[in-house]
Image (cartoon, grey):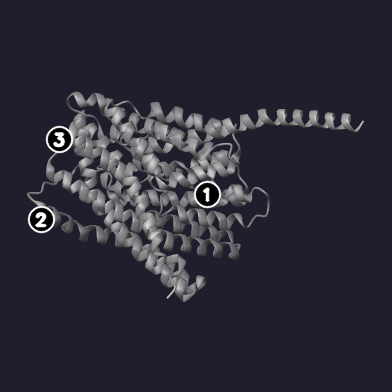
């Protein structure tokens, strides 16, 4: 029997290969450090390798399942919204989808487990509501043709006003929340809805306005967590990554992982259940997708479930906890002098291996008609993210306030909105969540937590903010490249015109 292209096994192998490319460089660097300069317990090293394996398998299964389920669901619902042509339907569906899909975002699950002073459920629901409201805002922007720069400047202005008066313990967590929420679970829905709503318009800029949705939605979590800080009293809790487990032998190691499975199976079931229920209601009322595609979507949801369970188990039990130990070890003794360069090296490899970055670089190359090559784009992002990772660890070690980085970074990013083409601004703010992939939340943030613990710093003020730093860098990088491309184009245009004029004179002279 011929295999349907939607379920070609090679697609799954491609996703696993992408996961390997993301995880293996970090695993290699950790092994190199542990075998040379930072000795760590053998059982923790084995647990880390087991966690890395589960991370690779989990990410592969999750991305494959999300591609086969979340993207078709998003496109089907987006198409239905377009056909209904009712504003209230568009807004209601946008809010509900933004809410229920964000709950299952894997990076958000990891972040919520590592925030000690906010209950995980409270934090996840707060962030999800923020995504829901700003997905509605993004849809209205497309319909009402509001310039993206107006939304960005207004909202980030409000964010920094609130941040000036908010509880400092909520500040870094809020900006981290904006970077972890628009990942492989949420982005397909947001993009599909945007394309569908943009189809309601027939003007030339409709397609361009379908970009920028992810960037707008990233604003919601930041605002909502800052607002939460004014009302939520906070509580004492534990950081999941800092719970270091010891194992007497390999059998105890296996039992440790197996004992954690039921907990994550239940958590992921609760997270995915709203999506499944909403889809089934839509299917039997308005969508009525044919039987074969419907069954493929259901199988995709199953793959998503299994992948998310593996990912969270590997990240929480073995992978992130060793990052905390490594951070503590590197921050003590002479190795503290190589701590910041080592973090920069890790940041370089993280972005180099991130599959979504490859898509982004190709997109920018196409839009610039080759003026910005994919190679130069990758190099620029690698340097930017390496710098962000190094500065994040420097913050965790020294306690430098995050505002010294965020205010200039966002000021430059928003100022560039006035000097680069609209499409570059939209892609830049969309790409903020692209660079902060799964390894930023599962490894770089726990590494910063370990460094901060060794330096006796404030975890909430100094360690958190790592994801925010990584997310901010593409905002400047993409727009600066767009500005360079624009200036080169303007310089080349008069020269081309002059050359054309000279050619005409020669041709007329020859005719005469």
122 sits left or right of 355 in the view:
left
Q: Which mark is residue 26?
A: none
Measure the alpha-carbon separation of dots 2 and 3.
23 Å
Snapshot quadrant of residue 455: top left
- Residue wearing tag 2: 251
> Quick one: label 2 or label 1, which is nearer the N terminus?
1
Q: Residue at the location (46% across, 76% down)?
A: 291
Measure the alpha-carbon separation of dots 2 and 1.
52 Å
322 sits left or right of 417 in the view:
left
Is there a contact, CB below 8 Å, between mark 1 and mark 3?
A: no
Snapshot quadrant of residue 487: top right
- Residue wearing tag 3: 39
* Foreground pick, 284 / 227: 284
Measure the alpha-carbon separation of dots 1 and 3.
51 Å
The correct choice, above or below, for 97 with respect to 441 in the image is below
Is there a contact, CB below 8 Å, between mark 2 and mark 1?
A: no
- Residue wearing tag 1: 137
* Foreground pick, 311 / 458: 311
Element type where label 2 sits in the image: helix
Total numbered labels placed on residues in the image: 3
The correct choice, above or below, for 396 with respect to 238 in the image is above
Name the mark nearer the viewer: 1 or 3. Answer: 3
Tell me the crowding category of disc 3: few under 14, some 14 to 19, or many 20 or more residues within 10 angstroms, Cα based. some
Tell me the crowding category of disc 2: few under 14, some 14 to 19, or many 20 or more residues within 10 angstroms, Cα based. few
Name the mark nearer the viewer: 2 or 1. Answer: 2
> Quick one: label 1 or label 3, which is nearer the N terminus?
3
* Foreground pick, 41 / 434: 41
């Amino acid at each position: 029997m011929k295999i349907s292209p939607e379920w070609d096994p090679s697609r799954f192998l491609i996703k696993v290969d992408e996961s390997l490319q993301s995880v293996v460089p970090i695993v290699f660097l950790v092994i190199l450090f542990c075998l040379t300069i930072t000795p760590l317990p053998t059982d923790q090293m084995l647990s880390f390798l087991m966690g890395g394996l589960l991370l690779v398998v989990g990410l592969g299964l999750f991305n494959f399942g999300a591609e086969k389920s979340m993207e078709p669901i998003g496109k089907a619902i987006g198409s239905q919204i377009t056909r209904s042509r009712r504003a209230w339907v568009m807004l209601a569906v946008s809010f509900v989808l933004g809410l229920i899909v964000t709950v299952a975002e894997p990076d958000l699950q990891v972040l919520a487990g590592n925030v000690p002073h906010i209950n995980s459920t409270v934090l996840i629901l707060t962030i999800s509501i923020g995504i829901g409201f700003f997905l509605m805002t993004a849809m209205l922007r497309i319909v009402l043709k509001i310039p993206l720069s107006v939304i960005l400047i207004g909202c980030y202005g409000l964010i920094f006003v609130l941040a000036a008066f908010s509880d400092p313990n909520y500040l870094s967590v809020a900006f981290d929340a904006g970077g972890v929420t628009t990942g492989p679970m949420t982005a397909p829905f947001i993009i599909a809805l945007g394309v569908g709503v943009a189809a309601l318009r027939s003007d030339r800029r409709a397609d361009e306005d379908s970009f920028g949705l992810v960037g707008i939605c990233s604003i919601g979590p930041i605002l909502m967590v800052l607002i939460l800080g004014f009302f939520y009293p906070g509580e004492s809790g534990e950081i999941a990554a800092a719970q270091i487990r010891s194992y007497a032998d390999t059998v105890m190691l296996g039992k440790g992982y197996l004992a954690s499975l039921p907990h994550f199976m239940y958590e992921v079931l609760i997270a995915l259940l709203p999506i499944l229920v909403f889809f089934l209601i839509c299917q039997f009322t308005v969508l009525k997708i044919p039987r074969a595609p419907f069954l493929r979507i259901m199988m995709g949801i199953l793959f998503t479930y299994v992948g998310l369970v593996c990912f969270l188990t590997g990240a929480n039990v073995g992978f992130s906890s060793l990052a905390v130990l490594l951070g503590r070890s590197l921050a003590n003794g002479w190795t503290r002098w190589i701590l910041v360069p080592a973090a920069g090296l890790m940041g370089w490899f993280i972005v180099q291996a991130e599959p979504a970055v490859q898509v982004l670089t190709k997109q920018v190359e196409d839009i610039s008609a080759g003026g910005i090559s994919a190679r130069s784009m990758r190099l620029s992002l690698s340097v930017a993210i390496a710098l962000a990772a190094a500065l994040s660890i420097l913050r965790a070690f020294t306690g430098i306030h995050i505002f010294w980085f965020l205010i200039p970074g966002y000021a430059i990013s928003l100022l560039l909105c006035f000097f680069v083409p609209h499409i570059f601004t939209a892609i830049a703010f969309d790409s903020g969540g692209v660079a902060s992939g799964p390894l930023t939340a599962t490894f770089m943030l726990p590494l910063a937590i370990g460094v901060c613990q060794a330096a006796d710093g404030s975890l909430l003020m100094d360690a958190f903010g790592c994801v925010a730093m990584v997310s901010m860098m593409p905002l400047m990088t993409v727009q600066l490249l767009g500005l360079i491309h624009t200036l080169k184009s303007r310089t080349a245009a008069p020269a081309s015109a002059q050359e054309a004029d000279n050619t005409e004179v020669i041709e007329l002279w020859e005719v005469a």
